[in-house]
Amino acid sequence: MVHQDDSFIREVNEELRSDQMRLIWKRFGRVLIGAAVLVVLGTIGKVGYDYWRDREASASGDQFLAALTLAREGKNEEALTALTNLEKDGFGSYPVLARMRAASLTAETDVPGAIAAFSAIAKDTSVPQALRDAARLRAAYLLVDTGTYEQVSAEAEQLATPQDALRHSAREVLGLSAYKHEDYKRAKEWFEAILNDSEAPRNLANRAQMLLDLIAASGKLSS
């Protein structure tokens, strides 16, 4: 008897659930179908976008590597053309990487043009900050031979702060510029800042020590 009652209760519950589902479907069936369609379309769209993105990134990567190969082979004009095209039509980070590499190639024959190119990248707010800082530093190094200390400082000094990841190179380029312009006091301060930083790379610290030794040996500034 108990078993029959349990069976009866289960049947009643199943009927109730069935009735509830019919009512829910009658009221919300179209909404549920629409939601399901949106989920399917969204999934298709995401898969399609991911495929397109991966394909574009792969194509741009291949173009960038081809341009680098041309540069290594000494075909700078062809490399610059390829990099210019990638800058216009590339995907993701490749356009700005192409700008950076093109500026480096330009420096081999046109230093003022390369400085202008790196400075333009440094001022472009659409470029990631890390690449802007790297471009600023490249411009500063090129200015050591062609510009004033003030021009080098305008590019590099903001990178020489204790918290900046590029501070070691920034201090070096400022020291080199000061040394070139025979401002030995300022050069000594920058080179000593490198040596006093426990995180300074060893090769850079060795160069700073060598230049400090040259300053001391020159007798133009008391140590």
Image (tube, helix red, strand yellow):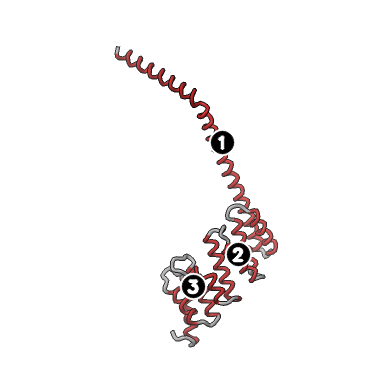
Q: Nearer the viewer, residue 106 or 15?
A: 15
The quarter in which the C terminus is drawn is bottom left
Q: Residue at x 61, y 52 (%)?
A: 91
Give me the disc on residue 171.
3
Residue 179 placement (x, y as % from top left)? 53, 80
Whole-Å distance between the Cαs marked 2 and 1? 42 Å
Name the residue tied to disc 2.
120
The mark nearer the N terminus, 3 or 1, is 1
Residue at the far bottom in the pictured view: 219
Q: Position of residue 1 (x, y in %)?
A: 30, 11
Disc nearer the start of the sequence (3/2): 2
Q: Which residue is mark 1?
A: 41
Looking at the rendered structure, the secondary structure element under dot 2 is helix
What amino acid type should be assigned to the residue bearing mark 1? Leu
Amino acid type assigned to the residue bearing label 3 in the image: Arg
Up the image or down, 202 lies above or below 54; here it is below
Mark 2 and mark 1 lie on one chain; the one further toward the N terminus is: 1
Q: Secondary structure at mark 1?
A: helix
Numbered disc in front, either 3 or 2: 2
